[in-house]
Structure formats: structure tokens, C-alpha cells
Image (tube, rainbow, N blue to C red):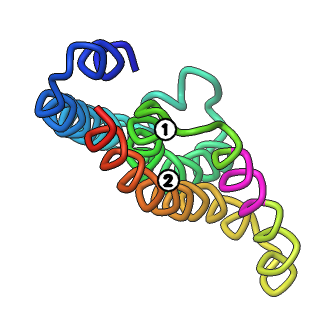
Amino acid sequence: VTFTSQNIGAKRYEAIKKIFNSTMLLTVVSSLTLSIFVWLFGEFFLSFYTNDAIVIEVGMKRLTYIVLPLVCNGILDVILSSSLPTFFMIIGICGVRLLWLWVAFPLNPTLEMIYYCFPISWIITSLILYIIWIPCHKKVIQCN
């Protein structure tokens, strides 16, 4: 937000796209790298908390459904920090999750169905915010 705001003030609009792309690349690469690392060594990390095989198995399921697709949440944060209101984040994250739990979860009431709501809400919210971000970005460039 700081870099984007500074570049709007300085009328360096080409830098805004560069900042967005650089931040997105850094977010995707770092979050994928860390997520894969944590997932690959998940049983080791989970053993810090417990030696119970069932708990570790459930923990690995959670890591699979939440840590691996965490990159979607990073993308969401990059798009949101590009001057979009929190309102869309609340609707996208909370609304999608509540709708998922109300509609999809009863069809298959398992722990995995609950875990699915995280990446699904991140993906849907990211798409909504990106669709909204495009005209906002164009408007800033045209107005200045």
C-alpha cells in the first residue's frame, strides 16, 4: 500500500504495475516454497505437539487442505493491499465460508469438507478482488 500510494502521488503509474507483479511473484514463490516444505516435513513438525499417530494423521490432512493452498491467501492479500476495501474481504471470506458450511457441508459432513472452505473462499475472494482491482487501477491511472 505504501509503495503504491507513493507512486500514485509521484505520478509513476508504470511502477504500480511493477510493484504489483513483483509482490505477487514474491508472494507466490515464498508461500509455495514454505507450504511445500511444511507439508513435506509435516509429520516431523506435528510430532513437536504429539506422538499420537491419529492426531498426526488428522494434522496432515489439515496441512494438505489448508497449508498447501495457502498461496491463494497470499495472492488475496496482495490484491487487497492494492487499495481495495475490507468489505469485499469480509463478504468473500466469511460469506463464502458460511455459505459453504450451510450448503455443501451437510451433503458430506466430514472434516475434509470443512477444510475445503478455506481454499475455496480464498480463491473466490481473490477472483472477486482481482475483477474489482482492474477498473480501480485503470481509474487511478486515467485520473492522474
Residue shown at 68% from the left, 51% from the top: 93
- Secondary structure under tag 1 reads helix
The image quarter in which residue 140 lies: top left
Q: Are marks 1 and 2 in contact (CB under 8 Å)?
A: yes
Decide if residue 17 is on the left or right side of residue 96: left
The amino acid marked with disc number 1 is Leu
Q: Nearer the viewer, residue 121 or 37?
A: 121
**For the residue carrying disc 2, how many other residues have a C-alpha within 10 Å: few (<14), some (14-19), or many (20+)?**
many
Under mark 2, the amino acid is: Leu
The numbered disc on residue 115 is none
Is residue 32 left or right of 54 when viewed as pictured?
Answer: left
Q: Main secondary structure of the magenta part?
A: helix
Q: Which mark is residue 80?
A: 1
Q: Residue at x 37, y 35 (%)?
A: 38
Q: Position of residue 97 (x, y in %)?
A: 74, 60
Determine the CA span between mark 1 and mark 2. Answer: 7 Å
Is tag 1's residue or tag 2's residue first in the polypeptide sequence? 1
Q: Is residue 137 above or below residue 123?
A: above
Q: Say how many tags the image has.
A: 2
